[in-house]
Amino acid sequence: MATIITKEQQEKEKMVTLVSSDSEKFVVEQKVAEKSHVIKMVMNCCGIESPIPVRRVKGDILKSILEYCEKHSKGEAQEVMEKWDKEYMDKAEKDLVFFHDLMLASHFLHIQELVDLIAVTFAGMLKMKSPEEIRQKFNINNDLTKEQEEHIMTTFGWAFQPI
Amino acid sequence: MAEVKSTSKRWEEMETDVLVKIFKELNMIELSPVSQVCHSWRLACSDIWLWHTFDLGLLKSNFIQTRASPYIWVDDRSDRRLTRVLKTAMALSRGNITCLIFHFDLYMKDDHLSYISERCPHLKRLVLPAWNRITKNGICQAIQRWQELESLTMPWIAHPPYIMEEISRNCKNFTQLKVMGSFDMNFALAIAANIPKLKVLSVRCSMLMKEALLYILDVMEDLEVLNISHCFLLEGRSTTFPGSRMVKELEESILCKTSRLREFLYCQSSSCITCQRMILDEGLMRWWKYEDWFWRLDEVNCLALEGYGKLFDQSSVNIALRD
């Protein structure tokens, strides 16, 4: 019996509490939190006893990120993961504000696999679109001067032809 | 620390680092419209991290070999296509290219070379295995602009001194040279006289005159790495194969001289596929017969070429081929 209790204690010790910028608490396994290079460093130097504040990331984003980290700490088959990643991204890219925050948070927390996944997804959204279509999709102001635009059009004209 | 703001207006205010990580997934043609979205995206599209190496290894010219100099005829469409690709790449990269790679079947003209030399002032490495159509003036003018050049991969040429002199005059940090095709006494003399500080030399898969090898080993005291793997070794006065005798194996006295080098790479073996191909092609490797990547190899890491990269991938070739 004694050994079982110790084991349970060890399991308990492996949990860590993360606190989002809007004070939402998440209790996750250490190996899940470790997917973030930044949190891993914090845990290495400060331990996991006290809650770790993730000040720049809001609760809904942190929740989604931890969902990703948890799935990716299980070591499942590649095909399973690829399918899961695709569904995860399909959902994320529907809301561009959410997608934007997810991207910045993945950078901030240094989760390399997620950074790469988001980059590929984002790049996919940019392909086959004209500059104006991209601006509209992401609500971006065109702050290029007329001269710059003219120069670009004369240089790149051929690349914009439909395929 | 400020919280990440959730407004949709922030896309143009994203840090360049974040944008660059996304844009590295795009090829040159996909980058073009993206660079036109707004000022900060335009800057990120030309980031050195995306552009330090521009590998055009998938682009070839349509050409016919001819009997008279420059022994090659290239169709106009190939030239126009190259102009277009270079114009786009130079406009996007905005001077950030430090390594340029071309295919051995890409025959550019002086105009192309001049265009890129003007727009890649910080070039450190050039891989240009075909210069039939480039004139002496053309290459010299380019070298004059490339003061930071450190590494060059070039074909065999009949009169190498002028280019070595130009490198000596302009490129103070030049240390790596690869010669493809043939390496004779003219080359050895030109290099020793003008670039005595050369550190790395590769003449792999070339017709190599033993006399030239000996001269390099005797005179080039600063040379650290020499690659003569799979060479077709010849001995004798004549620089052409029938007038010379083939050397089957390097003598002990020559191997002794190589011991002071940090690295001496040598392979002359009947069981080596590359050596077999050299014999089959009678000393002049017909690269086009073999795998696409075959010519890109080198036993010296810093002279080998890695993957083509994203900027000019296969789908860019398909678009570039549309006229």
Image (cartoon, rainbow, N blue to C red):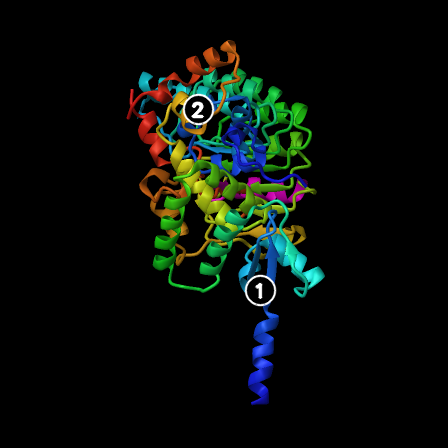
The amino acid on which the numbered mark 1 sits, given as a three-letter code, is: Gln
Query: What residue occupies the far front of the structure in this picture?
Result: A23
In reply to whether residue B136 is colored magenta, the answer given is no
Identify which residue is drawn at 42% across, 20% down.
B133
Q: Disc 2 marks which residue?
A: A135
| Residue B232 in view in this figure | no
Name the side, left or right, on which A114 lies relative to A51: left
Pick whichever, A163 or B86, lies toward us.
A163
The amino acid on which the numbered mark 2 sits, given as a three-letter code, is: Arg
Identify which residue is drawn at 60% across, 57% down.
A18
Check disc 2: other Cα within 10 Å, few if <14, some if 14-19, many if 20+. some
Percent position (x, y) of residue B85?
41, 23
Pick whichever, A70 or B63, lies toward us.
A70
Q: Disc 1 marks which residue?
A: A30
* Subunit that carries the residue with mark 2: A
Percent position (x, y) of residue A21?
61, 47
Percent position (x, y) of residue B92?
49, 24
